């Protein structure tokens, strides 16, 4: 008997920032919301993680929860975790929020792992410098700006994902 394989149409995506409490939880929530609207929930597995471990086990930052809620997106049930070595084999696509996260991920992956490593704003039609800037030490308007970047990028990412299914 052959080993069951995942549905070839399925795709798994891990969003990564530094702390996994501000940007990547927002990206996870926004992307999950859009995947649900597109009726693709059964085929897309979504998680988020941080390259750092300071906030492991914590819920998303209240400012991320607030900007998400104001835009109709729930971050309920999320809890910060750190990127694990297994993630580089478990996920198809690992999506970094900024260039520093991407460098840390490349270093951690070494030459192993099947995951493709990309920047979220590679998909942004208005990509600026390519980074979703860290809003942690700024004011609440930083979270609104970050939300807009993530939302635009996730909208394009879903089309990319559709083409790979
Ligand atoms: P995030 O923001 O990477 O978007 O989750 C940060 C959260 C916490 C810290 C840095 C960035 N920190 O230094 O604790």
Image (cartoon, rainbow, N blue to C red):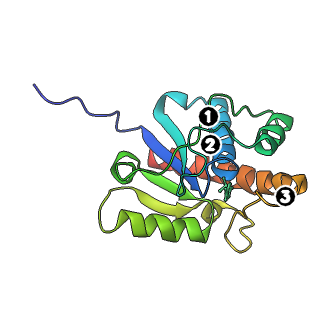
Q: Residue at x 35, y 33 (%)?
A: 7
Disc 2 versus disc 1: distance between alpha carbons?
9 Å
Q: Is residue 156 above or below residue 104?
A: above
Query: Which tag, 3 or 1, sits closer to the chain's start?
Result: 1
Mark 2, residues whose alpha carbon is within 10 Å: few (<14), some, or many (≥20)?
A: many
**As drawn, is 52 to the left or to the right of 146?**
left
Q: Which residue is mark 2?
A: 28
Q: Is the C-beta separation of discs 2 and 3 under 8 Å? A: no
In terms of image quarters, where does ligand 1 lie? Answer: bottom right
Rendered location of residue 10, percent (x, y): 42, 37
Query: Which tag, 2 or 1, sits closer to the chain's start?
Result: 2
Mark 3, residues whose alpha carbon is within 10 Å: few (<14), some, or many (≥20)?
A: some
Q: Residue at x 64, y 42 (%)?
A: 31
Q: Quadrant of residue 59?
A: top right
**As drawn, is 128 to the left or to the right of 107?**
right
Q: Secondary structure at mark 3?
A: helix
Rendered location of residue 65, percent (x, y): 77, 38
Q: The N terminus is located in which quarter? A: top left
Label at residue 78? 1
Q: Residue at x 60, y 52 (%)?
A: 157
Q: Secondary structure at mark 1?
A: loop
Q: Which residue is mark 3?
A: 142
Disc 2 versus disc 3: distance between alpha carbons?
18 Å
Q: Is residue 34 above or below residue 19?
A: above
Disc 3 versus disc 1: distance between alpha carbons?
21 Å
User: Which residue lies most toward the front here?
Assistant: 54
Rendered location of residue 15, percent (x, y): 56, 50
Judged by depth in the image, the label closer to the viewer, 2 or 1, is 1
Q: Nearer the viewer, residue 74 or 63?
A: 63
Q: Is the C-beta separation of discs 2 and 1 under 8 Å? A: yes
């Amino acid at each position: 008997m052959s080993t069951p394989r995942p549905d070839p149409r399925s795709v798994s995506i891990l969003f990564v920032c530094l702390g996994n409490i501000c940007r990547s939880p927002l990206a996870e929530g926004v992307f999950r919301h859009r995947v649900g609207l597109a009726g693709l929930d059964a085929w897309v597995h979504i998680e988020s993680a941080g390259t750092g471990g300071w906030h492991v086990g914590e819920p998303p930052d209240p400012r991320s929860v607030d900007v998400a809620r104001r835009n109709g997106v729930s971050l309920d049930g999320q809890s910060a975790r750190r990127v694990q070595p297994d993630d580089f084999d478990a996920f198809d696509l690992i999506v970094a929020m900024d260039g520093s996260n991407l460098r840390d991920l490349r270093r951690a992956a070494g030459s192993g792992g099947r995951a493709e490593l990309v920047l979220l704003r590679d998909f942004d039609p208005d990509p600026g410098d390519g980074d979703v800037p860290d809003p942690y030490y700024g004011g609440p308007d930083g979270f609104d700006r970050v939300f807009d970047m993530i939302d635009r990028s996730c909208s394009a990412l879903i089309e990319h994902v559709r083409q790979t299914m």
